[in-house]
Image (cartoon, rainbow, N blue to C red):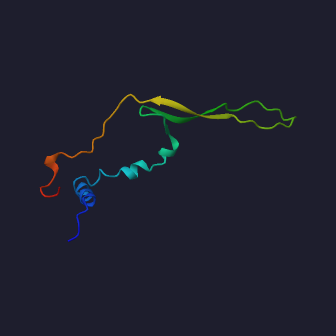
Amino acid sequence: MLPNDYAVEYSRFLDQIFPKKLRFGELYATPNNRRYRWLNAQTIEIPTITTTGRTDANRDTVSFGTRNYANAYTPYKLNNFRKWETLLHPKLMKPGTC
C-alpha cells in the first residue's frame, strides 16, 4: 500500500469545494504587477507621466529637441483593509478525508 500524500488529497478536496476560487496564480501573474509598486501593506505607487505639450519654434535656426515629459511614481495610501482567511470550517470537511 502506498503512503497517503495528504497535500495532494487536500488540494483535490479544495478543488472540489472551491473550483473557481483557487486561481490566485492566474490573478497574481497579471501585467499590473510589473506596472505598480508596493511600498508597504498600505501604500502603492502608480506611475504618472507629466508633459509640457507644444512649444514655440523658430524655423530659421536649427535646434535640438529636449524631453518634454517626466515619468514619476505617485504614492497612494489605501484606506480599506480586508482580511483573507484560508482556514476551512470543520463542518465543511467530509468525514474520512482528514
Kindly give the residue lying farthest to the left in the view shown.
95
Q: Say above or below: 35 vs 51.
A: below
Q: Is residue 97 left or right of residue 59?
A: left
What's the residue at 76%, 30% (across, down)? Answer: 56
What's the residue at 84%, 35% (across, down)? Answer: 59
Where residue 3 appears, as percent x and y from the top left, is 23, 66
What's the residue at 77%, 37% (across, down)? Answer: 65
Where residue 5 appears, as percent x and y from the top left, is 26, 62
Where residue 79 appears, as percent x and y from the top left, is 38, 28
Q: Is residue 83 or residue 63 the one in the foreground?
A: 83
Q: Say above or below: 47 vs 3.
A: above
Q: Is residue 98 or residue 20 the one in the foreground?
A: 98
Q: Quadrant of residue 53?
A: top right
Q: Is residue 76 left or right of residue 91?
A: right
Where residue 1 appears, as percent x and y from the top left, is 20, 71
Q: Say above or below: 1 vs 85.
A: below
Kindly give the residue lying farthest to the right in the view shown.
60
